[in-house]
Amino acid sequence: MRHLQTRIQATTLADFVENISDHIGSTITAHEESYPPYVSVSPIITYPESAVGSPPSPPTPPTPPTPQTTPPLIIIPAITAPPLHTHPTPPPRAMAARFAPLVLPANLHDMPADYQSKIPMFDGTPQSITAQQHIDKMTTFFDLYELDEEDVTMRLFVQTFAGEVRKWFRGLAANSITTLEALQNQFLDRWEIRKDPLQINAEYNNLKRNPGESVQDYIIRFNSVYNAIPDDLRPSRKSALLKFPDGFDPEMAYSLRDRDPPTLEEMQKIAVSVEANLNDKRARMKAEKRVTIKEEASTSNQVL
């Protein structure tokens, strides 16, 4: 740069302009009156030879981007599940009327299969068992089938009512009974025959198994009468153990005494098993008797 500056100052202004124009391809205007001299440089625009004499072509506009086609939007309607029941389905109207005095939950547990053929009935007639005996039988039924749900036990107990007892129950105030115990207490208050203590004691002394009565039913009746005797008049458990076999026929009574159980409860269990054994023995004897009769008839025919 220092060398170039020396050369520019050493020559004339015209020579400087000419020389530097050749080097940088620009139009230079000199200002002679200025010292040290300076130049203003204007850029020279050059065109191709084919374009000489014609105006410059405008710049090519940019190509617009090709619009992208958007696939059609498919709207799938939402599938909503039916609303869930927020409240349990109430019992049918017929059931609600049948058990109107009972306070039952909205969701009821299932009743045992074929329960109608298994539960005892109670109609309150003199020929039927006492109300307490009926309660004892139903308690045994509940234990046997392991029924703990109170809505089931209450409905089953009501299903045992027949005749006037059923009419009495349906005449009770609606939603007035909340538990099985309350139901049984009202049942006893209405249908249990209140007897004189001496009368109960006399009934106990005369207890006998009725014709066609099962051992299990007789045990329930025996215990019901025994427990109904007032405490100051009730015989001891040892005395009841000696009394129990008297209610059976001589063959059964002998089998029980021959086992010599230590408690009344043990004797009653033995009585159930003895009855089953005796029933099997009687069935075999009947079968043998039929075979003997057939053989005798066949021999008689051959003789004739």
Image (spheres, rainbow, N blue to C red):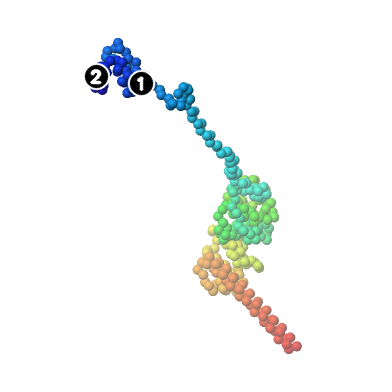
Residue 193 seen anywhere in this rendered image of the structure: no
Compared with residue 114, is residue 18 higher up or lower down, i.e. above or below?
A: above
x and y percentages locating residue 145 in the rendered image? 57, 59
Residue 1 seen anywhere in this rendered image of the structure: yes
The residue at which mark 2 appears reads as 6
Seen as rendered, the residue at the extreme top is 33
Residue plotted at (59% across, 70% down): 276
Seen as rendered, the residue at the extreme right is 304
Q: Secondary structure at mark 1?
A: strand
Q: Secondary structure at mark 2?
A: helix
**As shown in the figure, which amino acid type bears the numbered disc 1?**
Ser
Compared with residue 48, is residue 212 higher up or lower down, i.e. above or below?
A: below
Q: Name the mark on residue 26.
A: 1
- Of the 4 image quadrants, the one containing the C terminus is bottom right
Alpha carbon separation for disc pair 2 and 1: 21 Å
x and y percentages locating residue 55 in the rendered image? 47, 22
Which tag, 2 or 1, sits closer to the chain's start? Answer: 2
Task: Please give left or right for residue 47 compared with residue 90 in the image.
Answer: left
Looking at the picture, tell me which residue is in the foreground, 128 or 84. Answer: 84
Looking at the picture, tell me which residue is in the foreground, 26 or 291. Answer: 26
